[in-house]
Image (cartoon, coloured by chain):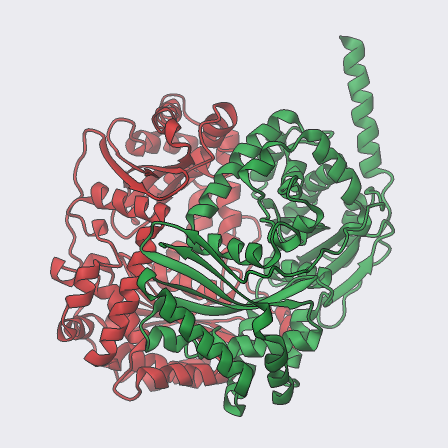
Amino acid sequence: MKTVRVFRLIVLLAALAVLAGCGQRVDSISVGSDGYGKTTMANGITLLVNHDETTSLTAARILIDGGVLAETADNNGISNIMTRMLLKGNAGMSGEEITEELDFLGATVSAGCYRDFSGIALVSLTENFDRTLEIVSQSLLSPTFPEEELAKLKLEIEGEIKASNDNQSNASDRLFYRTAFGDQGYGLPSLGTEESIADISVDQIRAYYEKYVGGRNIIFSIATDMPMERLSTLLSKHLGGLRAEAQAVPAPSMELQSEQTGFISYDRNQSFVYYGNLLPHLEAREVACGRLINETMGANVGSRLWSLRQEEKLAYTVYTQLRTDRYGSFFRAGIGTDTSKVRIALSSLDREWKKLVKDGITEGEMADARVNMKNNLMFFIDRKSNRANNMAYYEHAGYGYRFVLDLIDMADRITLDEVNHFANNALTNDTRYVSIVGKR
Amino acid sequence: MRYTLAALCLLLVMAGSGFSLDWYTETLDNDLKVMILENHQVPQVNISTTVQVGAKNESDYYDGATHLLEHLILFRGTENMTGEEVSDAMKSHGAYFNGYTSSDWTDFVITLPRENLDFALSIHADMLFRSNFPEKEMAKERQAVYEEINISEDNPGAKAYRSSLKEIFGNHPYSKNVLGTQEKILSIPRDSVYAYYKRYYAPNNMTMVIVGDVDTQATMKLVKKYFADIPKGMDAVDRYAAPPVRDHVVEINIKKDIGQAYLMMGSIGPKADSPDQFPLDIIATVIGDGESSRLWKKLKDELGLVYSVGFAFYTSKYEGTVLAQATLDPANVDAAEQAIKEVLLDVKQNGFTERELRKAKNKLKTGHYASLERGLDIADKYAQYDSFIGRQFVDTYPDSIEKVTLAELNEVAGKYLNTDSYVKTTVVPK
């Protein structure tokens, strides 16, 4: 018995030595006059920094390349499960100990999966960030993926899938992607399905971890008030020990399905419709064009689709969205409407889309769109957690970590011709998809 | 870029338990309370004005009128502008604007570029005091609210929550659905809503909070320009009625086209001015906030009865609400109810640990600081709390939490954790 304990202690000490002693130092972190900076650690981790002394809070995001794009229909949900299992046990702490200590620190740490990446988000008082990151990095470097924790997590995710299905706009969102991409790539739901997660094993999770979790696949972004020298030391200590090697996630097939309308029957008062275009990866200026169109069409009270609510009495909620992922984008409208009005709503959306494609937007609308685009983008950078998220998100999507600031600059430099050319060429019928969730 | 350079102006000071914001406050002669905080983080200004009128002020005749009125003020025109002109003006000034109605208050917010502050205050005054929403326009807004009620009815969690409050509070105004009923929304006369508006929308019933990239004195001049001449009105009168005293469990069962069960077990909590609310915040955190909470560890990790479980205390002006909630397989509802009761009984009989107390304090204080990071959140939080308990509540919350002792926790747990008299609501699949 005693021998076994000593052996365990040696293993633990060895693991801690890997974590603490063999770190690859971040030699220097510098930020520009705007408070932003970028560097690459020796193990390949892309490090994005925003220095901001406004509050004594620190927010960070660990982004791992992959997400549903690294899955198939058979193992759909594994990226989400692997990332959340990181926090369920490591070489030095059980899952319960990790949760208990993070809560004791008052830190908010959450893990999840998105379309083309998974990640961990951290927020804590700066004075507690060293310990918070130490715990999370130990989990990133030496996860144990305990079998009993996997069973508990699957139960939790099963509930999340059911809750998501109970929400019509969420169900319509998933249906929109599934209608466009089928059972591959962006068509798969990020939580997986009840059937697909049931068979995922610890061995599969470990294999997924070995394959994709390495410095080359990781972006670490942080918005903090701590001095850069201290941040440098802290990141070297906690993240320097991560191996660099990781397999690149293959680019997905972006082949679109021929059937362009999807429907799911729900016995509810309301139906929820998404209507819009699937787009390829957009260039930076195209994103700015898309945002200006979004402002004009449905991002604000008074935008074009507002009339569907205000005058046509079709809805409580109607809006447009532009989303720009790494390999593809969409521009779409969402509307929750009485089931008896779905046809009229679709007809109104068709009308507005045709008008946009044919005539574009006007000089006056462009002027309004510029000021609203800048104002709305401020919400992307007005707190540290938003900044940490957006730096990592846009860096990963290929636009660069300062992209929100770039977009604010671009709002005044994009021309009306560019915007209308984009509308005319990108929002065509062949990439138009519709999802409807509601009473048949 | 100036956005982050300007952030060197320190806003929040969080040394130890100390916490302060450098507010300028002034009450105009018409009793409008004004608070201004310079925050130069981004070149925006946020205005949040809270009116001390909510569903708690409605008689049965006026069911849902406060919320409908919020919509009409936002979207259906003033004496000087049509609804469309208001929307267009907001759009051309880059303004985000919105409103929220609760049982206790109605809140109106505008966020826009700092150079448009004059416009913001001008239109804010117009909407708050000179709305007129002609019947033709009001008919359209009735339909939007009708659709909003449909959305809410379709949401199983919201349905369970509203059904619980209706039973928990009985004749107390918090039993009312803030959205009203579809029948009432479609039928209440325009003139009645207008009279209700004129009765309650007076500067003496309002707190205006301005946070942003502004100069305090110049801002105060503009506030006076647009608001100082508004005459005082009658003070808002709440329609308070004591909640029922319960000595047994009441069950509500609802069936919907959904995939899992939603369980709520609710009862009455302390009022906002009660010192019990701080210990109860800590108790709720220990029992049901997150994966290290007692309910999570027992019901999910140990017994595998639920997909998720939590416990919360919601503060209101009058009695608050204490609520255990879970999502689960319908077959586990009774077992989960029993397990929740056992956790609550254990707490009442054996109390809490020093570590649990410290952990909850850390969580609550960090969450409080994080909730005051951005301008719009600061403006909203101060305006809303000032409308029913005073802004000092927000300033002193970390200290109030820090002072709570283990003995107080045990005493307050005995008062508010009910295991034999509560409202049990389930929404289950058809």
| Residue drawn at point x = 51 percent, y = 49 percent | B367
**In this rendering, would B109 be left or right of B180?**
right
Vertically, is B155 above or below A96?
A: below
Q: Residue furthest bottom?
A: A363
Note whether residue A323 is visible: no
Q: Give the x, y percent position of residue B173.
A: 19, 52
Q: Give the x, y percent position of residue B133.
A: 24, 79
Depth check: give the residue in front, B289 or A180.
A180
**In this rendering, would A310 be left or right of A235?**
left
Note whether residue B252 is visible: yes
Vertically, is B369 above or below B376?
A: above
| Residue drawn at point x = 46 percent, y = 75 percent | A350
Depth check: give the residue in front, A342 or B44.
A342
| Residue drawn at point x = 82 percent, y = 51 percent | A216
Depth check: give the residue in front, A61 or A35.
A61
Q: The chain coloured red carries which letter? A: B
Where is residue A257, by image quadrant?
bottom right
**In this rendering, would B54 be left or right of B24?**
left
| Residue drawn at point x = 42 percent, y = 34 percent | B328
- In the rendered image, which quarter contains the N terminus of chain A? top right
Q: Residue furthest front?
A: A258
Q: Give the x, y percent position of residue A404.
A: 65, 70
Depth check: give the residue in front, B117 or B421.
B421
- In the rendered image, which quarter contains the C terminus of chain A? bottom left
Vertically, is B223 above or below B336?
A: below
Q: Give the x, y percent position of residue B213.
A: 53, 76
Vertically, is B197 above or below A120?
A: below
Where is residue B248, by image quadrant?
top left
| Picture mark count | 0
Q: The chain coloured green carries which letter? A: A
